[in-house]
Image: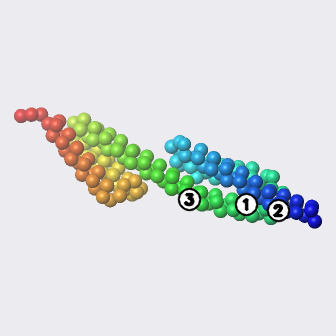
Amino acid sequence: MGGAVVEFADRRDDFRVAKAGAAFSTAEATARQFQDNDWETYETRYRESMTKVKEAALKDVRLPSNRQALELQFDSAVERGVLGVRNTARGKEVEFGRADLSSMLDSYRTAALSSADEGLRQQNVLGAQTAIKSALDNQYVDPTDAERINKAWVQSYGEGTLDTLPYA
């Protein structure tokens, strides 16, 4: 009877130790994933890290039922984690999209104002409008922001145009 109690305790300990190790490794791996701006690979890297964590956590689990239970729990936790990773990646994508929009609008304004060719000026104005529309389509800005950004750009471009006119 004493051997059965020890074996039961070993099985519970087997499960508990593996679960604790996986939880620690998961938290550590997740924290490492978001220290860079390569948001396009967040999910892939997260899944790869979690696969390694899972393998490490399960390698010492001897009892098949414990292994199966931990595997199911782990797979479920990874899928929940993927949702968080996707949200983080999307946040970074929007942040970069907005920054790119701002940079593009500055470039289009500068190019349009520095060009003597009316055709090139019009291409740059169209480029700015297209960039704003693209940012809206990609949901980097909402319709209200897009309208505000467009009005501000047009006003800035108009003022810049007036500044380039020779005084009479």
Q: How far across and down, in percent of the image, does residue 158 sit? A: 19, 44
| Side of 104 relative to 54 (left or right) | left
- Image-quadrant location for residue 103: top left
Q: Is residue 131 above or below residue 78?
A: above
Residue type, numbered disc 1: Glu
Question: Label 1: how many residues lie within 10 Å, few (<14), some (14-19) or many (20+)?
Answer: some
Depth check: 109 or 47 in front? 47
Residue type, numbered disc 2: Pro
What residue lies at 36% left-to-right and 46% top-to-bottom?
A: 101
Report the Cα–Cα distance between label 2 and label 3: 29 Å
Depth check: 107 or 59 in front? 59
Report the Cα–Cα distance between label 2 and label 1: 10 Å
Depth check: 29 or 106 in front? 29
Q: How far across and down, in percent of the image, does residue 3 sit? A: 92, 61
- Image-quadrant location for residue 160: top left
Q: Name the residue carrying label 2.
A: 64
> Is any atom of residue 94 visible in this view?
yes
Number of the label disc, if any, that sits on residue 71: 1
Q: How far across and down, in percent of the image, does residue 102 sit? A: 34, 44
Q: Name the residue carrying label 3.
A: 83
Q: How far across and down, in percent of the image, does residue 167 sit? A: 9, 34
